[in-house]
Image (cartoon, helix red, strand yellow):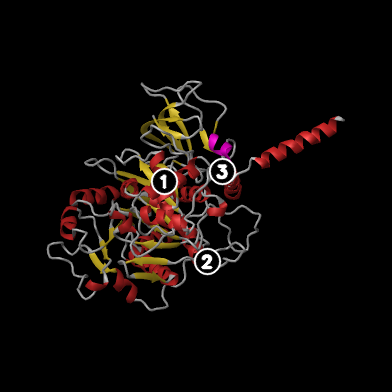
Amino acid sequence: MGFFDNLLVSFDDGVSGLFGQWNLWTSLIVTALAGFLAYHIATRQDPDTHPFLLARQSQAAPVRQPGESPLYRSQGAPHGMPLNPGLNVKDPGASKWARGRDGDLRDIWRQAVAGVQEDGPTRGATGRVLTVLGAQNVEEHCLDDITRQINLIGQHIVGQGGQRVAIYLPNSVELIVTLFACAFYNLTAVILPFDQPDDALISMLRRSAADTVVTAPGSFPFDVVVKNYPSLRQLIWVVDDGSKHMDWNEVPEGSGGTVTVSTWQDTINDNSVDAGKDLPPIEGQEEPCDVTIFWQPKAGQQEDMVRFTAANLVSAIAAQLFAVPASQRMGPSDLFLPADSLANSHTLVLTLAALFSNASIAFNSVASQADDLAIATRGVSPTILVTTPSALLKTHKEASDRLASSFLASKLHWLQTRQLTQAGVMPAFSGGVLSSVYANTVRPPGTTKLRLILTAERVGAETPKLSTAVLSDLRAFTGARVMYALTAAKVAGAATQTGFYDYRVFEHETCSHFGPPLTSTEILLRDTNEFKTTDERSRGEIIVRGPCVAGQEAALGVTGLIRDDNTLAYV
């Protein structure tokens, strides 16, 4: 008998022996193995981003100066190329291949009114501007009406001789209108943190040399300010509907009659309905004045006053637009909610970026004063949210407490976390039975449509720290990606920010890394007495440079290190 005959006989004996011993247990084992393999093949997904992109997130310069680390830049702004200076605004009729202007705040509002410019199904679509007045009352503002308010408020302030306008308001449409009015009418905007003690408010007015204040009754101590700050010349009250019947134009006795008092509503209503409909032309306009922002450090310390130029702000806005992958960028289908104060440059820059992207914006005056996502999102379901680390920590604790009481939900959370950290895939709430059980247990109210959360560590402000484990849990709880930034007083927007697809978790750490620099910044670490850079490791005081930095360079006063993946972290 030949070799092949023996081989066939052996194979026949083996198959006969296998099936001769087949029983119920064999069937169950084979079925389980087949089902396991089929499940993994059917559910297998590629990571949201290539692991190599997470392993080296920024570029180090090939040389470094003595006592300093190399300069680190975003992969999107390599060494030898300029950092991102602006918005690349294309004027009507310009070639699509020509480089556009860097732009300024005026171009942001023009873009918001004009709508999407790129060809596609959303061409011409504009976002909405909403004011949330409660769980059941959401007011929508017509963009043309906002344009009219920008013109009339700007003209009124200029007509009364105003030059430096202090904005003392909670998050609101009026705050944004006043900011754009200052940009279009060459006025200096001074954004004051809301709800401050009288002495702190007067100190900020003195330091900024404001001559005009736009504020709301009940929050601004008029008598005290006039008595202690005689340089005030003009006051504009933003009156709510319930107080319109009162006479707000009266100047209290003892003020000397030096302050011109008016109301926002009267300024708008006293003009014809056709007045102020057209924005000033682009041609011949001067560059807008600076925007002054007060940075609030630790409790009891004086606020840092920082003047940002128009170039600083548009560079920061452009960097935030670039930080989100093209397929995930903001657009008309998004509802953006700033649940942190617009007096923070990070929140302000992101809000302006949302306007430039034609996303809808919801303003909630109580959102920035409450570290509670349930309160911040009441009445709306945002897709993109800017909030504080303390609000996220509170949300994390509440969801974790609910998770601990449900055995099934805790196991589903383990699967969600494994998919995030091991597979590199953002899990989605599929709508199935198990997914519904998990979502009903852990998902915070108001986050049913959420897809992106932006938050920031504020250097020197005693902000609660977020670990990568907490960030991972928040992604699983909300179904949204989380980007964690490092912000500082003299940096418009953010100095560094974690990647959109960075879901990694590092054990035994109390604070997450802060990602790589944005396309508008470059960072280096300067030696201190305790920490020095070597050829193997970069450690020292964090220095930020770039077109979004006031004065082009800022020392943050805190020590950091560059990790093996070229991201920035605290020492």
How far apart, in angstroms, are the residues tagged by discs 2 and 1?
49 Å
Query: For the view shown, which residue lies furthest in the left direction?
Result: 254
As helix, strand or loop, the secondary structure at mark 2 comes to helix
What amino acid is at disc 1?
Answer: Lys
How far apart, in angstroms, are the residues tagged by discs 2 and 3?
69 Å
253 vs 490: above or below: below
Task: Tell me which segment is drawn in magenta.
Answer: 49-56
Q: Earlier in the sequence, mark 2 or mark 3?
A: 3
Residue mark closest to the camera, 2 vs 3 = 3
Residue 65 pos. (x, y %): 50, 24
* Residue position for label 3: 25
- For image coordinates 31% across by 49% down, the residue present is 398
What amino acid is at disc 3?
Answer: Trp
As helix, strand or loop, the secondary structure at mark 3 comes to helix
Query: For the view shown, which residue lies furthest in the front direction?
Result: 20
**Residue 558 sits in quarter:** top left
- For image coordinates 27% across by 47% down, the residue present is 207
Circles 1, 3 touching at the beta carbon (< 8 Å)? no
* Residue position for label 2: 114
What amino acid is at disc 2?
Answer: Ala
**In-front residue for pair 44/52:** 44
Whether 283 is among the magenta residues is no
Magenta stretch, main secondary structure, is: helix
* Residue position for label 1: 411
Residue mark closest to the camera, 2 vs 1 = 1
**In-front residue for pair 456/375:** 375
Q: Quadrant of the N terminus?
A: top right
**In-front residue for pair 556/426:** 426
Residue 491: tell me if it is visible.
no
